[in-house]
Amino acid sequence: MRMKVCALDDLDIGGAIKLDVQPPVAVIRGESGDVFAIDDTCTHADASLSEGFVEGDAVECPLHMAFFCLKSGQPSCPPATVPVKTHRVELIDGDIYVEISRG
């Protein structure tokens, strides 16, 4: 399912938008300016990554300081050991679209 998120200019560097899908998806603009989409729930605990802290092109879980690479979804430090799912992002005419993949 492809979903329009917002205009690129409406998502600040380091900003995030939580998409209300099941499971939720976080659309995050990294410090590089690139936009990424990952499953919103930390794999270590039930915390929203869209409320996390962006450093470079990674996001830190707001509860337990686990970092996830926005490109791959891989955790880079404990306590998280399981990656989050990533989703394809497209920029079309200045708008952000996310292809939400399941399964």
Image: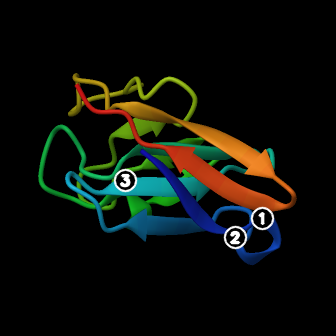
Residue 2 in the figure: left or right of residue 50: right
Give me the C-alpha separation between circle 2 and circle 1: 6 Å
Towards the viewer: 49 or 78: 49
Q: Counting residues from the N terminus, which is met first, the one under dot 3 or under dot 1?
A: 1
Check whether the beta carbons of the residues at disc 2 and disc 3 lie within 8 A of each other.
no
Count the marks: 3
Check whether the beta carbons of the residues at disc 2 and disc 1 lie within 8 A of each other.
yes
- Indicate the amino acid at tag 2: Leu
- Indicate the amino acid at tag 1: Leu
Image coordinates for residue 98, horizontal then vertical, percent: 55, 48
Image coordinates for residue 83, horizontal then vertical, percent: 31, 25
Image coordinates for residue 65, horizontal then vertical, percent: 33, 48
Give me the C-alpha separation between circle 3 and circle 1: 17 Å
- Indicate the amino acid at tag 3: Val
Residue 81 in the figure: left or right of residue 71: left
Circle 3 is placed at which residue position?
A: 25
Circle 2 is placed at which residue position?
A: 11
- x 20%, y 33%: residue: 79
Say if residue 56 shows up in the picture: no
Badge 3 local density, few (<14 within 10 Å), some, or many (20+)?
many
Q: Which mark is residue 89?
A: none
Label 1 residue SS: helix
Check whether the beta carbons of the residues at disc 3 and disc 1 lie within 8 A of each other.
no
Badge 2 local density, few (<14 within 10 Å), some, or many (20+)?
some
- x 62%, y 52%: residue: 97
Image coordinates for residue 73, horizontal then vertical, percent: 43, 29
- x 27%, y 32%: residue: 102
List the single residue furthest toward the left: 45
Circle 1 is placed at which residue position?
A: 8
Instruction: Indicate the quadrant containing the N terminus: top left, top right, bottom left or bottom right.
Output: top left
